[in-house]
Image (cartoon, rainbow, N blue to C red):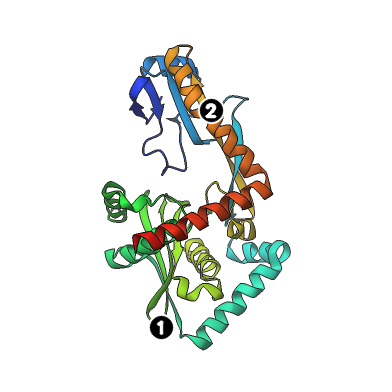
Amino acid sequence: MGFFPFERHPLGIGKPVAAGLTDAQGLVHLKDVQIHPLWLLKECGLAVYEFDHLVAGQPLLLARHERHPSPIIDLRDGWDNYTKSLLKNSGKTYKSTLAKSRKLQREAGLLRHDYATTDLEPLRTLLSWKTDQYRRTGRADRFSHPWIVELVERLLATQSESFAGVLDMVYVDDRPMAGHFGLRTRTTLAGWFPAYDTHFAKYSPGLIHHLAMAERAAGSGIEVVDMGRGQKEYKDKLKNGELEVAEGRVARIGPAAGVHWVMRVPVRKTRATVMANPLLLKTADKTLKTYGRLRTVLQR
């Protein structure tokens, strides 16, 4: 009837495979199948299963779990209809992005777009930009872990009709400007690692790239670009729909579940409070960026 991918941690704590990287979590199962969450945990030998991107419609999903939007670019009605919705809902952003693209080409050179390239060199350029972004904003650098780099490279090398790693790069006068690495099925492109060269920051390279990527994706049969959970300005400007993911845990009664609650739940609730309050979120983001600048100076 399906399968349940998870990692087992000490005390019988279950987490999604590659927790912290996966933006779609839970069971892969037959439609309308009935699976009791506590029965599943018992059969898997788990005391707790913790998640932060549990997809909608899961047997593991309970009423108490926190729901979060996952913005999407819905291309099911075609590229032209999507741009019409952009003009209606984010007209200023759409027009200014096109204007910046024209200005960029006047001042720096012609744009070239490589969609779904499998070359490793541009991937490494993209990952270096992402590392710089993590450090600059005070976040942990995911690509300091060799296994994550290896995972991304193996996914890029995986190319089939139903699943593939997708590397997408935009160049200015043959200089890499912005890019993205994600995963696709036949009809969905899942956003994962977008980044750009900060030398071009004044031209809004991320928006220029995302529009170019969405247009090429639509032409290749992609119906939905899932930009993933997270409050980002560019997602609000580009979205024309939303999916939903949940955060929380399912737990069996026992000492392990109690220890996990003490260690994880108050922290999660505090983070949710900060994320929901614009003033607290702005303060936290500013603090992280200050930390990132100090860390960069010290490393140099």
Q: Quadrant of residue 244?
A: top right
Residue picked out by circle 2: 265
Secondary structure type for disc 1: loop
* Mark 1 residue type: Asp
Q: Position of residue 31 (x, y in %)?
A: 50, 29
Q: Amino acid at mark 2?
A: Val
| Residue 170 image point, x, y percent | 43, 72
Which residue reaches farthest bottom?
106
Residue at (63% x, 66% y) in the render? 83
- Residue name at image x 58 percent, y 49 percent: 284
Gap between marks 2 and 1, in whole Å? Answer: 50 Å
> What residue does disc 1 label?
173
Residue 251 visible in this rendered orientation of the protein: yes
Q: Residue furthest right?
A: 88
Q: Position of residue 2 (x, y in %)?
A: 40, 27
Quarter in which the N terminus is drawn? top left
Residue 27 is tagged as: none
- Image quarter where the C terminus lies is bottom left
Frontmost residue, 103 versus 287: 287
Q: Is residue 174 above or below residue 141?
A: below
Q: Position of residue 299 (x, y in %)?
A: 35, 60
Name the residue located 51 percent from the left edge and 84 percent from the top edge.
Answer: 105
